[in-house]
Amino acid sequence: MKEKKVALITGVTGQDGSYLAEFLLHKGYEVHGIKRRSSSFNTGRIDHIYQDPHTRGLPFHLHYGDLTDSTNLIRIIQDVQPDEIYNLGAQSHVQVSFDAPEYTANSDALGVLRLLEAIRILDLTQKTKFYQASTSELFGKVQEVPQSEKTPFYPRSPYAASKLYAYWIVVNYREAYDMYAVNGILFNHESPVRGETFVTRKITRAAVRIAAGVQDKTYLGNLEAQRDWGHAKDYIEGMYLMLQQEDPEDYVLATGETHSVREFCERAFRHAGIRLEWIGEGIDEKGINADTGDTVIEIDPRYFRPTEVDLLIGDATKAHEQLGWYPKYTFDELVAEMIEEDQDKINLVIDNNEDFAKISKYIQ
Ligand code: NDP
Ligand code: GDR
């Protein structure tokens, strides 16, 4: 009988980690994930596939760990002996990286080095394939559009600068030690389980809550930023494909379409049943409900970044041609699905609580 392949996922409790764990289990992998110790539950996205270790179930195992802790990473990799490591763990919020730059560098840059060194120390360079979650933030300040594997990098945040180190250390270990190590340069990808402080989910969540009368308005920053937004489900398949090739190479994954934050707002509010209109200018601009005149979006300067990435649009031709990878979701399907699932979540809260007014203050 063919032995199960073993995968280790860092960042398994995050958006991509949870989809990837599910995907690899379906493919017949034994899946191990690293989760951080937290004072509150942080496994909400993977609870449906995790079973108590005392009962037999899916071959899915969790290990406590942290990308800032070398000895712990070495021990986990020694125990698991993975065929594939997907390094998805990171302090992944660009704006937060301006507030916590050193921690971001420690986890997002040095964390990658720690994993690569662990593979080397344990003599696994010819067994363990390594996927690094690189990012379109590497392109940063616009040099050319669309952006491909050949576009020069110009990081615009401590997050992106950390990911730049990570990108190059992966290339270096591939060349120096003949490792199968690759960078997936992924453009923004979202889903109903996207973290609530990223702009797409912040907007879809606010739109359904405003439509349900639980929240009056939301505050946003730069409405003009343009992003190439895809669906996380499509992107995790691309990660897997990158580790199944003859030779290790880096790939861009993107939809090739770009939309502004403003457009995302209009589309999301429309799906939630609110027609948006804009009045005013600059930081005094407001999004209003065209039917009631109520202000539903205001600008808050605190959400502007010291340095912004204005325009991202990816060219995934190499992934199309060599991996056979194409995104399946359209932009409209992505927004619609996020709205529908946020509507389900809010309906559940409303159904489960007789005293709606009382609970509404807790779910702001
Ligand atoms: P999330 O923020 O949803 O998930 C990040 C994961 O990393 C969480 O599981 C988090 O744990 C974990 N983590 C954070 N810090 C550490 C640490 N010090 N040690 C171990 N684990 C840690 O991110 P996404 O799923 O959206 O993204 C996955 C990866 O892809 C990230 O590296 C991100 O930078 C990168 N990326 C994402 C893109 C996107 O559009 N989503 C695009 C391009 C790249 P906890 O749950 O405890 O917080
Ligand atoms: P990004 O995602 O920085 O592209 O990084 P985010 O959703 O945080 O921002 C996208 C754009 O929206 C603008 N914006 C706001 N952003 C947030 N978070 N909150 C707001 O209120 C707001 N208002 C406007 C931002 O200025 C920005 O231009 C994501 C992360 O997943 C990274 O980990 C990943 O590497 C990149 O995508 C590709």
Image (tube, grey):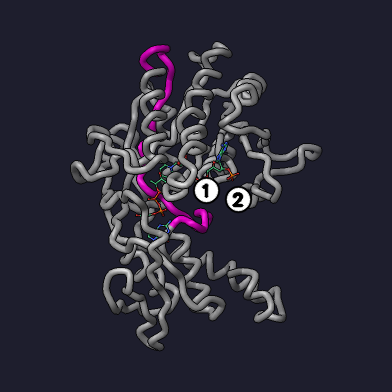
Q: Is residue 260 visible?
A: yes
- Position of residue 180 measured from the top left corner of the image (x, y, whole percent): 43, 20
* Amino acid type at image mark 1: Gln
Magenta stretch contains residue 8 = no
Residue 45 numbered mark, or none: 2
Q: Is residue 55 left or right of residue 153?
A: right
Quarter location, residue 21: top right
Q: Which residues are magenta?
A: 174-198
Q: Is residue 2 visible?
A: no
Question: Mark 1 — residue?
Answer: 15
- Position of residue 161 measured from the top left corner of the image (x, y, whole percent): 37, 36
| Disc 1 Cβ-to-ligand 1 distance below 8 Å | yes
Q: What is the count of numbered marks?
A: 2
Near-viewer residue (45 or 245): 45
* Amino acid type at image mark 2: Arg
Near-viewer residue (307 or 238): 307
Q: Earlier in the sequence, mark 2 or mark 1?
A: 1
Mark 1 neighbour class, 10 Å CA radius: few under 14, some 14 to 19, many 20 or more: many
Residue at 43%, 28% (x, y): give it.
244
Q: Callout 2: helix, strand or loop?
A: loop
- Farthest residue to the right: give it: 54
Marks 2/1: CA distance? Answer: 7 Å
Q: Are marks 2 and 1 in contact (CB under 8 Å)?
A: yes
Task: Please identify the quadrant where the N terminus is shown.
Answer: top right
